Amino acid sequence: MASAFERVPGAVVEDGILMHVGNPLVEQRRLVRGDAVAPLENRSAVSVTGPDRLAWLDSITSQAVAGLVPGESSELLILDPNGHIEHAAGFIDDGETAWLLVDSADAEPLVAWLTKMRFRMRVEIRLVDEVAVVGAASPDTAGLAAFSPAGVPLVWLDPWPGITAGGYGYAVGEHPGQAREWAEIIVEASERDRIADAAAAGEVTLAGLLAVEALRIAAWRPSWAREVDERSLPHELDWLRTSVHLSKGCYRGQETVAKVHNLGHPPRRLVAVHLDGADSILPPPGSEVRVAGSEVGVLTSVALHMDDGPIGLALVRRTTPDGDATVETAEGAVSARLETIVPPEAGAAASVPRLPRLSRRASAAAPSGS
């Protein structure tokens, strides 16, 4: 697949996606400073039009979107009947069209599923090939011209890691994602060529997907393309924060979401992985994670971060302890340290406060009432 960015000096393109332009570590710093833009050729836009679009999406997804105002950013999941994640999307409505920003690999399956679910609702669903998606710390970077057919700039501001209305956060303490600002801008497809020409002329600074992924991983931000498998529950990824409204009406998978949150615990949990960089081995996603020789989970994402060095995310068994671990690679085991993102007690213990237990002696001595 050809890319407009192949003509930019130093650009490395794989499968039509700009991976980097020479130095992913420098590109991370430029993104953080707001000095670079990242062509997100791994992201696609799906449009939903029609007068029933908001009420319909509200009824079939995990998020309450019916009351959102034009230009307001949100995020939603589509779950199977057992609460497992099937699709994930950023959401923004311009007053006439609801736009879903999705991983490109999931765009056509999502369109097919939504089309099957229309029934008698007045909605139309389409994968929009006439637009592209560009990422940046600020939508003002490089003067990006947002695609806005209804007059509302289509700039999706990532709500992560804030806890949106009806959401719930399991990670405790200071969240590293609070330092990350991220916007995804829907632009005319022709903007690819304009940005590429400007970058080739030295007028625009680019960053590739490697830099984008490193900043996402450092922010503990889950990705449909990396962290989701056929068993994934939103609780395991701390995704109740931004993509689930716990008190809205029924939707497919809602019973499982409520049951796990209020009565049980997810079987797995997301952890941060700090890798030993001494051997210069960066384990690929899918590598086994082991503690004391026993497999406990799998590495889902990995990157070389500008400050933290080699880092990753992993899904492990709920009871897996923090601390020393190894990640298995073809070149041998890589030493690692696991850090809690989703605590082992996430779920019932996190949502229902536990009262202090009294000993029988203390209970007997307590006054019986007035």
Image (spheres, helix red, strand yellow):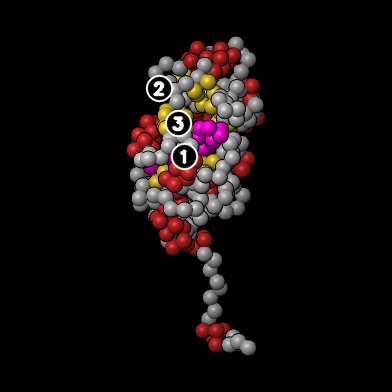
Alpha carbon separation for disc pair 3 and 1: 16 Å
Magenta segment boundaries in residue numbering: 84-99
Magenta run includes residue 172: no
Circle 2 Cα neighbour tier, 10 Å, few/some/many (<14 / 14–19 / ≥20): few
Among the 4 quarters of the image, the one containing residue 122:
top left
**Which quarter shows the N terminus?**
top left
Q: Which mark is residue 15?
A: 2
SS class of the residue under badge 1? loop
Alpha carbon separation for disc pair 1 and 2: 37 Å
Q: Earlier in the sequence, mark 1 or mark 2?
A: 2
**Which quarter shows the C terminus?**
bottom right
Which three-letter amino acid code belongs to the residue tagged 3?
Val
Image position, residue 250 (x, y; %) = 43, 53
On screen, residue 26 versus residue 19, left or right, reads right
The answer to whether residue 333 is visible is no
Alpha carbon separation for disc pair 3 and 2: 21 Å
Q: Identify whether 361 is placed above or below 137.
A: below
Q: Which mark is residue 46?
A: 3
On screen, residue 319 versus residue 168, left or right, reads left
Dominant SS of magenta comes to strand
Which three-letter amino acid code belongs to the residue tagged 2?
Asp
